[in-house]
Amino acid sequence: METLMVDRVHSSLRLFMNRNAVFLCERLCAQFPAETNLQLLATCYLHNNQPYAAYHILKGKKLSESRYLFAISCFRMHLLREAEETLCPVNEPNIEVPNGATGHYLLGLIYRYTGRVAAAAEQFTQALTLDPLLWAAYEELCILGVAEDANECFSEATALRLQQEHTSTSNLEKSNFVNENRVLSSNVSASLVDISPKQIKQLHANNTAEIPGYPHVRATALHVQNSIPSNVGQFDSPSPTVTQTSGIVPPPLFRNLHAYQNMTSGDAPAKPKVAVNQPLRRKYLDEARLKKTEDSFQVTGRLFNQSSDSVPRRSARLSRDTPINSNSNISQFGGNGTDHSSGKLRANSSTSSKLCSTAVRSVQVRKGKPRATENFDEGSRYEAVDEMWTDNIAAPSSSVSIVEGRCFEQDKAERILSQESKLATGIRELLGLLRTLGEGYRLSCLFKCQEALEVYRKLPEPQFNTGWVLCQVGKAYFELVDYLEADHFFELAHRLSPCTLEGMDIYSTVLYHLNEEMRLSYLAQELISVDRLSPQAWCAVGNCFSLRKDHETALKNFQRAVQLDSRVAYSHTLCGHEFSALEDYENSVKFYRCALQVDERHYNAWYGLGVVYLRQEKFEFAEHHFRRAFQINPRSSVLMCYLGMALHALQRNEDALEMMDKAIFSDKKNPLPKYQKALILVGLQDYPEALDELERLREIAPHESSMYALMGKIYKQLNILDKAVFCFGIALDLKPPAADLAIIKSAMEKVHLPDELMDDDDL
């Protein structure tokens, strides 16, 4: 009953019938309250999204698997400290982490979410050492920024190790299987000594029939099939064990023609007829005579004597086509006169790859043993043991056995070599794929986006055109501030895999920057229809409202995303952005810090904190946070620009100019660093250089009203009033923001006034 219930529970879990699995497993634990059954019940609860139930039944259990399942329950319930104590008990410092690589991976996640980055990296590394194919561990190391080169992690040494582990595991399983079969074979043989020939024939007829006394053993384990004709072995008793065969001569499988001729011609010395196991023999022969009258067949391997000087009956065709070879190893005569020579039998035996080795060897051994001569005609029967058969049969049959054994071993060796070669090829191909994917992902997490794109382009087309890879390519272009290319690859990923939600929050931000309001709205509706409980869907909805300047509604949607999964750092950051837009800097700082608790390398949160402190004129704090963001992502032109702005606010103009030059060199299409550099030069009263920089800016951003307003101010300082008025006019025509509109109008009205009469706030 217990075994049946366990099997049904596993079957229900495989078929995703989680409620059914929970019900059956609860009945199982009520009847058989073993801890292993409790582990199965906890597994059912976790599959059914009931971690609290698994937590309740496993609390205090000490088995390794119970500790692991309990830690999983605690992790899902955000009880990280209790999960850590379960995996690494304080009072047992030498105890091993349960479940090997996966246990270390879970412990690494706990350390990461509690801010212990070094300890988390150590656990992820340990997990990857135990299981080199645990991609999730390598992914976490990349997120932490401490992953080693993928070529080292998924190297040839790793391939050899995996191949050796797989081979040793396979050999161990095979040895266990052989040992179990040997025990089964001896037990089954011992129980089949008294089975009648009619029962054996039924076993031949139905190879799925169950052996009496051993319902789990099939008849195919006892007979060699497809290698000899069906009429062979009708009177062949199952092979008994060595202790059972002492004093018992088994019935013959085949006859040697030469030995028979010697016996019938009188050459063989007279031997007393020994009756061995007379009741059993009589039983077999009676069954044979009855079978003969019913089916009209001859027993293969038995010679029927009509008189003392008669010769074996053969068909005229057989005598004419196939001469008798008195030295043939094995001769087999069927009732229809067909001659099955020994060579044909060997061919069948050696070419049948499905034969069990133990069954083949059983047939070979019986060929070389002494056989009992059974002559019977019209009711007369006798049994005699001819010792001369040993001399006639032993040598040829042993040579046949050696040849067949060598062929079998050779085929087996070739099969093993072929399997090992395929295994080695498969492992190398898999590790090669992981090397490419791992290196691309590692470079992306280090924000070396151009190098990451080059690595991803090396992937074969079927792998490149997958949702995950296309999203990674889109993220790389997003970090490069190439929103058009990012939009292209995200759109391909979404079209190829509409139900993939990972990366769709970044895609919604790309559409936000491109001002694609209609497409962003459509994307948000699609994601909500796919999964209303995914944070990515609500981030897309929030970006849609943020693009419409409805920051309060956007904030509610971002908070919903945080509520659904508090371990998504980007959701916290988007909340911080909305609070900052609403000038609620206190809550903005709070959400940015929450994002950093989830992911310390989330540079967007460091940037957001820097912007808040810059607006609050806390320039030292702003410079600190911008620098932390810049250390994480040293190739971002935007971060360089804002760090330069903070340095300029701290009157460190030389450092600020140097940082602006780096930002311009990093992204020549970004207009912001050029404009900020011009502002710094104006502050240093280097007007000609500032005008040159603004002229270069006009080539890439000809419709920026703030640029023309700054040019008008410079021309006013240079006393070129007509150009100053012209530039102020263009700035007004470009419809600047309301805050800048009044300033530009005021400056234009006072363009003819001397500088000492100008207000300090004017531009």
Image (cartoon, rainbow, N blue to C red):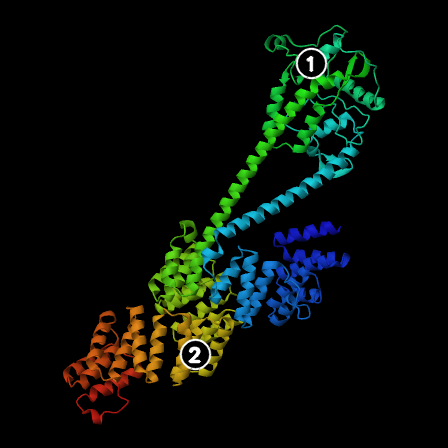
The residue lying furthest to the bottom in this view is 757
Point out residue 57 in the picture as x, y percentages from the top left corner. 70, 64
- Residue at the image point whose x is 40% and y is 50% from the top: 461
Q: Which residue is mark 2?
A: 609
| Quarter of the image where one finds residue 330 | top right
Point out residue 191 in the picture as x, y percentages from the top left corner. 79, 34
User: Mark 1: which amino acid?
Assistant: Leu
- Residue at the image point whose x is 72% and y is 52% from the top: 5
Q: Which residue is mark 1?
A: 257
Q: Measured along the vertical axis of the image, is residue 306 above or below residue 170?
A: above
Checking the image for residue 758, the label placed there is: none
Comes first in the chain, label 1 or label 2 = 1
Whether pointer 1 and pointer 2 mark residues with C-beta atoms closer than 8 Å, the reply is no
Answer whether residue 551 is visible to the viewer in this image: no
Point out residue 433 in the picture as x, y percentages from the top left corner. 46, 52
Q: Is residue 154 left or right of residue 261?
A: left
Q: Measured along the vertical axis of the image, is residue 639 above or below residue 375?
A: below
The residue lying furthest to the top in this view is 309
User: Mark 2: which amino acid?
Assistant: Leu
Specify few, some or many for label 2: CA neighbours under 10 Å numbering under 14, 14-19, or 20 or more: many
| Quarter of the image where one finds residue 731 | bottom left
Disc 1 secondary structure class: helix
Disc 2 secondary structure class: helix
- Residue at the image point whose x is 18% and y is 92% from the top: 754
Answer whether residue 326 is visible to the viewer in this image: yes
Seen from the viewer's position, the closer of residues 459 and 590 is 459
